[in-house]
Image (spheres, rainbow, N blue to C red):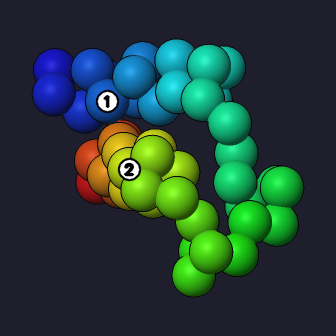
Amino acid sequence: MKKQFFKILAKINKAILPSFTKQRLDLSKATKLQMVIFGWRLYVTKRALD
């Protein structure tokens, strides 16, 4: 159930949140908001794949 929840959440994130890797964002120059979004997407993706 938990894994299914994160898979659905990952699809929602993909549709709504921007992809910084496709934009070739330099993480050393990213703002705090961009870092939070990047970290959130990474967390959800990791949980969905476990």
Q: Disc 2 on helix, strand or loop?
A: helix
Q: Disc 1 on helix, strand or loop?
A: helix
The residue most toward the bottom is 28
Give how far across and how far down residue 39 sits, in percent.
Answer: 38, 56
Q: Which quarter of the figure is the C terminus placed in?
A: bottom left
Residue drawn at x 30%, y 23% is: 4
The answer to which of 50 and 28 lies nearer the viewer is 28
Relative to 23, residue 29 above or below: below
Of the two numbered discs 1 and 2 on the same chain, state the one appearing first in sequence.
1
Residue drawn at x 62%, y 19% is: 16
Residue drawn at x 70%, y 45% is: 19
Please indicate, yes or no, whether residue 49 appears anywhere in the rendered image: no
Amino acid on which disc 1 is placed: Phe
Relative to 35, residue 17 above or below: above
Please indicate, yes or no, whether residue 33 appears anywhere in the rendered image: yes
| Residue 22: numbered disc | none
Question: What crowding class fits label 2: few (fewer than 14 Cα within 10 Å), some (14-19), or many (20 or more)?
Answer: few
Amino acid on which disc 2 is placed: Val
The residue most toward the left is 2
Question: What crowding class fits label 1: few (fewer than 14 Cα within 10 Å), some (14-19), or many (20 or more)?
Answer: some
Give how far across and how far down residue 11 sits, in percent.
Answer: 55, 23
The answer to which of 33 and 38 lies nearer the viewer is 33
The answer to which of 16 and 7 lies nearer the viewer is 16
Give how far across and how far down residue 20 sits, in percent.
Answer: 70, 54
Relative to 21, residue 47 above or below: above
Q: Which residue is mark 1?
A: 6
Give how far across and how far down residue 18 sits, in percent.
Answer: 68, 36
Q: CA distance from mark 1 to mark 2?
A: 18 Å
Q: Which residue is mark 2?
A: 36
